[in-house]
Image (spheres, rainbow, N blue to C red):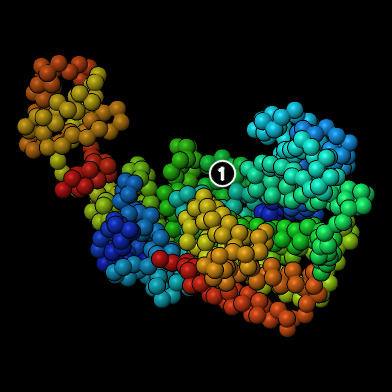
Amino acid sequence: MATAINVNNVSKRQGNVEALKGVNFSVNRGELYGLIGPDGAGKTTMFRLLTTLLVPDEGTVTVDGFDTVKDYEAIRSRVGYMPGRFSLYQDLTVEENLKFFASVFSTTIEENYDLIKDIYAQIEPFKHRRAGKLSGGMKQKLALSCALVHKPSVLLLDEPTTGVDPVSRYEFWQMLHKLKEENITIVVSTPYMDEAKMCDRIALINHGQILKISTPKDIADDFNDALLEVKGENLYKLMLEIRKMRTVKSCYSFGDSLHVTFSETPDTEGFKKELSELGQGGLTITPIEAGIEDSYMKLADE
Amino acid sequence: MILKYLLEKEFKQFRRNPIFPRLMVAFPILIIFVFPWVTTFEVQNIKVTVVDDDNSTLSHRLTHEIENSRYFNLVGAEPSYQLGLADVEKGTADVVLDIPRDFEKNMIRRSGSNIQISANAVNGIKGNIGSSYLNAIVAQFATKIASEHGLKVQPAVNVITQNRFNEYLDYKKFMIPALITMVLILLCGFFPTLNIVSEKEIGTIEQINVTPVGKASFIIAKLIPYWAMGLIVFTVCFFLAWLTYGFAPQGNVLLIYLDAVLFIMFMSGFGLVVSNNSATMQQAMFVMFFCIMVFILMSGLFTPIHSMPQWAQDIAFFNPPRYYIEIMRSVFLKGSNFMENWFSYMMLAIFDLLINFWAILSYRKQS
C-alpha cells in the first residue's frame, strides 16, 4: 500500500515549549488515521506542519510524496484542512463560503458536487444564512464541505468534533467513513478516546512524543493487566483511599467509576472488604475489559 | 483569476459590515459641513466684564465700542476690579477691562491714560488673541478721541498686511485639505490593517494560507478596496468643498492626485507593517493610534513645522505625511507646479519604497 504521509524524526519548538520531539509515523493511502492525545500533546502543531503552515526544526514531512518545505505549493492544492477553530468567513453566507473556497482552488461547486453532496445536502436548506449564525454542528459540516470542495487527496481534520453534540459527532464519523471509500486519506485528531476506535490506526501522543501506533483493537488488547471497575458513594475519597493501598498499581477516574489495576492478581472480595472497613459505602466492583483510554493512561504513565 | 474572487469577497464583507459603509458617507459630510466650522482658529464670543471706575461719557463710549465689536460679548459690569476677577474665576468672563478713575480727564487733558486688561489664559489661544483684539479696539478708540479733540496724534508706521494665497485668512481653506488628510489616514491606513489583523484573530487567515492563494494577491485584494474608497472620498470632499465654499485647486488637479496616491501607498504599506507584527486587533489599533498621533502632530497639519524646535524639525524631516501636506497646500492654494515640489514628491516616493519593501519582508505565511 502506498504511503500518503510520511513524518520522519520531526522536532518543532514553539516558543519555549518543545511541541514535538522526534516524531515518526506514516499514513497509508486511503487510511483513516487518528492522532489521539490530550490538549497540549502537540496535535495541532503536527497539523500545522502537515499543512505547510509550520516548518519543522528537524526532520522531514512529506504529504502525497511532496516535501512540506520545498514543495509546499504542490501540497496546498492537494490537502483539505479543517482547523480546530471554526475559520470560515462568518459574514458570508453558507453558499458564498463554499463558492469562495471552490474558486480559490480554481474549481466550482458543481465539479465536485458528488463528493460533498451527502454533507452539503444537510446544510443546503440554510445556504442563504450567514456562516456566523449557524449552530455548532452545521458549522462543522460547512467547514468539512469547504475543505472537500476541491477534491483533496489528503484530508486533515484538527479536532473536528470538539464542541459538537454526541449525535452530530456520531454522524460526523459516519461521513468520514464514507469519504474513506472515495480513497481519500484522512488524518483526524481528537481528545476523545471513544472516537479512537472509529479509526483504522491510531497514534497515541503525549508531551510531543508518540507513545504507540497500532490499530485501536491491538492497543486495547495489549493491556494485559487485570482491570477492576469500582463504583462508590464518594468517588474522590474512594480514589484517594485506593491509591494509598500497597497492592494497587494505578487508579484513574473514568466519569462515574474508577479503573484500578494491581501489581499482583487481585482478590476482588478481599479488596471490597478492605474498602468497606475503611468506611466506603455503596461499593460495586466488576472486572472489565480494557479500553483505549486505559491503555493510554498506562502508556502515558510509563 | 483568483484576485477577482478575493476582491468580490472583500467588497461583500465591506458592504455587510454594520459600520463601514455608513462611515464612508459620514466622512465627507463631517469633513465639509461640520469640521470646518468647529476647527476654527478664529476667536469669537470673548466674554468681557468692564470695571468702570470713571463712569464718564468717554468710558461709556469705549464700553459701547467693545459691545459693538463682533468678537466680544459684554457680559457685565462690576464695581471693582476684585469682583471682575471673581467673574473670571467663576468662568462667566474671559477678559476684565479696568477703566481707571479720571480716564476721561487724563485722555483729554494730557492725551494719555492707562487701561488694564486682564485675560484668562487657561485657554492660551483665546486669552492671547482676546487681549490683543481688545488692545486694538482701545488703540483705535484712543486715536479717534485724540483727533476729535484736535490733539496731535503721534505719527506711527501704518502697517498694511496682505495675506497671499488666502486673502481673507479663511481658515477653512487651510483646514479642509488637512481634514481630508485625516480621512486618507483612516481609510487607507487603519482599515486595511484592522481587516488583516481581524482575519488573523478570527483564524480565517489560516484557512486562506493553506490554499494556493499567493500572499501578494491576498494582500492586494485587501488594499485595492480601500485605495479606491480613499480616492472616492478624496474626490467627493474636494467636489463638495467647491460646491459649498467655492474652493477650487489653484494648481494642476493631476498633481494633487499624484500626491494623494503616493500618500495612500505609504499609509497602506505602513498599515501592513503594523498588521504583520500584531497578533490582535487591540495591539494593531494601539500601535496605529500611537504612530498616527506622531504623524499628525509632527506633520505641520495644525502647527507650522518651522516654529518647532530644531530637534523636532529634524524628526519631522522623516515624517512622510509632512511632504504630502506640503505638496497639497502648495498646489491647492498656491498653484505650484511639479518642479517646485519635486523634493517632496521624491521623499514620498522613497518612503513608499522603503515601507512597502519592509511590509513584504515582514509578511510570512510560514514560520
| Residue at image point 37% right, 70% down | A62
Q: Residue at x 43, y 64 (%)?
A: A53
Quadrant where the image shows the C terminus of chain B: bottom left
Answer with the quarter of the image where residue B108 lies: top right
Q: Nearer the viewer, residue A164 or B33?
A: B33
Q: Is residue B273 left or right of residue B147?
A: left
Q: Is residue A31 left or right of residue A129?
A: left
A171 is higher (above) or lower (below) than B151: above
Q: Amino acid at mark 1?
A: Met
Which residue is found at the position 55% from the left and 46% from the top? A139
Residue B58, position in %: x, y? 87, 39
In this rendering, does residue B196 appear at all? no
Q: Residue furthest bottom?
A: B339
Determine the residue positioned at 77% across, 38% down: B99
Q: Which residue is mark 1?
A: A138
Q: Nearer the viewer, residue A129 or A257?
A: A129
Q: Quadrant of the N terminus of chain B?
A: bottom right
Quick one: A225 or A243, which is closer to the camera?
A243
For this view, does A295 lie left or right of residue A118? left
* Residue A56 visible, this angle: yes
| Label 1: how many Cα within 10 Å (few below 14, some 14–19, many 20+) | many
On screen, residue B149 above or below B365: above
Chain of the residue where label 1 is placed in the rendered structure:
A
> Residue B287 location, x and y as percent?
52, 56
Who is closer to the viewer here, A47 or B51?
B51
Q: Secondary structure at mark 1?
A: helix
